[in-house]
Image: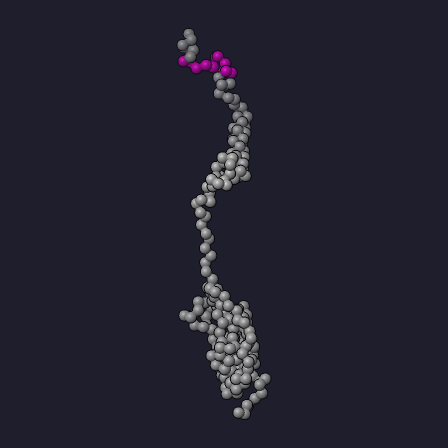
Amino acid sequence: MVKSRAQNDIGPSTNGLALPDEATLPYPLRVQAIYVSAGDYVKPETHPVYTLMDSAGAQHTYCFDLAGQVTEVLVRPGQIFRKPTRVFAFCCDTTAKAFAADVAPSRVKPLSAPPLTPRAVPSRPAAANTRRASNGPSDGQSATWGGPRKQTLALGGVAALVAGLMLLSQGKLWATGDTSPAEAVAEQPAETAPAAINAVVE
């Protein structure tokens, strides 16, 4: 068979490869890897062309379904698409098929990854918050506090709150000049006693 051009020449674009249909893969799609360049010859099933990642995190590698030559690479790794578009152009004339027939299978190892699944957060077992009889704390502390450190912090906080309330109440007394109720009664002069008490004394 007489070939109309040299093997290194790039033939005319006769076919193309587009992104999968939206019913096939969930968009957006990200180009994870490209395994060919313009001028490469490929065969179906033995020459992976590129890998996509779908919106679920699964990776899918595609081959071209005909033997031929890559004439254009219209995408780059990392590019994200939200709708189908053409990503490669190929020459599939008789000359390109003849050259592709002599090409050894590709040695690239396509990327692959299973779909992403939501990470389940395990719930804490109820027994985790209770003291174990065998190796639990021996000082009689409550298991609800979760240890002596937390218990100490809680008691310190209560003590600080009580001290703050005491200081606040003393501050109010100092600000108003008031004293305790017992002192107020003891210091009250006789002439200011209520009239009812004076009436009884007389």
Quick check: 102 above or below 48? below
Residue 163: x %, y % from top left: 54, 31
Residue 160: x %, y % from top left: 54, 33
Farthest bottom residue? Answer: 2
Quick check: 161 above or below 94? above
Using the image as rendered, state which of residue 30 and residue 119 is in the foreground. Answer: 119
Farthest top residue? Answer: 202
Residue 114: x %, y % from top left: 48, 65
Residue at 50%, 86% in the rendered image: 93
Residue at 49%, 74% in the rendered image: 62
Farthest front residue? Answer: 134
Counting the numbered discs, the total is 0
Using the image as rendered, state which of residue 38 and residue 66 is in the foreground. Answer: 66
Residues rendered magenta in the picture? 186-196
Evaluate whether residue 126 shows in this view: yes
Residue at 54%, 27% in the rendered image: 170
Based on the picture, tell me whether residue 86 belongs to the magenta stretch: no
Using the image as rendered, state which of residue 78 and residue 146 is in the foreground. Answer: 146
* 121 lies left or right of 10: left
Using the image as rendered, state which of residue 113 and residue 68 is in the foreground. Answer: 113
Residue at 56%, 88% in the rendered image: 5
Evaluate whether residue 12 shows in this view: no
Quick check: 112 above or below 40? above
Can you tell which quarter of the image residue 174 is in?
top right
Residue 76: x %, y % from top left: 55, 72
Quadrant holding the C terminus = top left
